Image (spheres, helix red, strand yellow):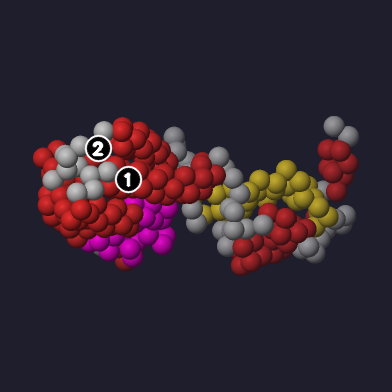
């Protein structure tokens, strides 16, 4: 029997799968159309869409792997694979963005003839598919850095498609062929902006950084303020996933409070969970005499 979260996961997988097929068909059409029309902007948008196809495929696989249970080789489970997938996606975007900037610079030097009608028609089709894909991932993006990245990619694709349509229209109306590389450069710049804006958070998680939205000093003060706690040391605070934080520390108890250890532990864990949303905490307790021993080392 499937639970609600299993059904939600399968429903989400179907949405991502549909987005993969739609974007793959669009990418092929845009590449063919870009070659026939001689439009670098259209090919640039196609490459961006292809990066989304790869991102969707990686995210789809990561969603599946992340649900694998923990085993002896991966005792924390496989959930962080989605973070790795996000890093791969953003790195690919950066490479594509830099390549498109280079190509647009070459086109500025020698603007080619561009078939405006092909650009406008395929740009309109791309806008429809990009908007549909963004809607498919909208409801899923709030709880996953992976899916949020995909949503932002598809939203940027939709905006890029609007830019491509504008470029084709200007070519048809005024013969401004230099607009094509200009639009390409703008698309590339926006791709790079999104990638560099988002990749920092992914790297922070992989580097075991503390959650940026939670002040570690406040967390430590909350632990120290628990009655019976003298001080804490060897504190570590990091993110297992985007919305899953872990905290471990050595807690030195006040003299004559060792018998209250379990009560103090329960109070600390309750405070961490209720005030900061930290559900995974590891606490090692020491008597005050250990503190003096540590300080002499």
In the rendered structure, the answer to whether residue 270 lies left or right of residue 41 reads right
- Quadrant where the image shows the N terminus: bottom left
User: In x, y percent, where is residue 97?
Assistant: 36, 40
Task: Determine crowd level at label 2: few under 14, some 14-19, many 20+ residues with C-alpha closer than 10 A.
Answer: some
**Left or right: residue 273 compared with residue 194:** right
The answer to whether residue 249 is left or right of residue 50 is: right
Quarter of the image for residue 140 reads bottom left
- Observer-nearest residue: 26 or 286? 26
Q: Main secondary structure of the magenta part?
A: helix
Residue 118: x and y in percent read 12, 49
Is residue 76 toward the left or the right of residue 153 in the image? right
Residue 289, percent from left and from top: 87, 45
Which residue is at 38% across, 52% downward?
A: 149
Does the stretch in magenta take in 147?
A: yes
Lower position in the chain sequence, tag 2 or tag 1 = 2
Instruction: Find numbered disc 2 in the image and state the secondary structure of the residue it sits on.
Output: loop
Q: Residue furthest front?
A: 174
Q: How many dots with numbers?
A: 2
Q: Give the residue drawn at x 57%, y 43%.
A: 208
Q: Is residue 67 visible?
A: no
Task: Count residues near mark 1 (Cα–Cα under 10 Å), then give few for <14, some for 14-19, many for 20+.
Answer: some
Of 149 and 181, which appears nearest the observer?
Answer: 181
Residue beneath disc 2: 111
CB of mark 2 within 8 Å of CB of mark 1? Answer: no
Q: Find disc 1 in the rendering and name its residue.
A: 182
Relative image position of residue 23 (x, y in whole percent):
20, 50
Give the spatial CA distance, label 2 vs label 1.
10 Å
Image quarter in which the C terminus is found? top right
What segment carries the magenta color?
A: 131-154
Instruction: Name the front one of labels 2 and 1.
Output: 2
């Amino acid at each position: 029997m499937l639970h609600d979260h299993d059904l939600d996961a399968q429903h989400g997988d179907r949405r991502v799968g549909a987005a993969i097929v739609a974007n793959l068909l669009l990418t092929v059409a845009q590449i063919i159309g870009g070659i026939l029309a001689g439009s670098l902007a259209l090919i640039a948008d196609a490459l961006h869409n292809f990066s989304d196809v790869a991102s969707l495929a990686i995210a789809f696989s990561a969603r599946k792997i992340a649900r694998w249970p923990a085993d002896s080789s991966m005792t924390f489970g496989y959930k962080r694979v989605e973070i790795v997938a996000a890093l791969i996606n953003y790195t690919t975007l950066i490479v594509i963005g830099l390549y498109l900037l280079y190509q647009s610079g070459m086109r500025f030097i020698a603007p080619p003839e561009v078939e405006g009608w092909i650009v406008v028609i395929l740009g309109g089709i791309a806008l429809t598919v990009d908007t549909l894909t963004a809607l498919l991932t909208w409801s899923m993006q709030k709880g996953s850095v992976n899916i949020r990245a995909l949503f932002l990619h598809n939203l940027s694709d939709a905006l890029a498609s609007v830019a491509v349509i504008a470029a084709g229209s200007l070519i048809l109306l005024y013969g401004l062929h230099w607009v094509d590389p200009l639009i390409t450069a703008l698309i590339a710049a926006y791709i790079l902006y999104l990638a560099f804006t988002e990749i920092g958070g992914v790297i922070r998680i992989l580097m075991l950084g503390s959650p940026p939205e939670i002040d570690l000093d406040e967390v430590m003060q909350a632990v120290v303020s628990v009655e019976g706690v003298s001080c804490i040391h060897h504190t570590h605070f990091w993110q297992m996933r985007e919305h899953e934080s872990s905290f471990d520390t050595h807690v030195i108890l006040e003299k004559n409070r060792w018998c209250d250890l379990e009560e103090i532990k329960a109070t600390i864990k309750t405070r961490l969970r209720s005030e900061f949303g930290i559900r995974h905490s590891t606490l090692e307790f020491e008597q005050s005499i250990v503190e003096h021993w540590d300080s002499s080392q």
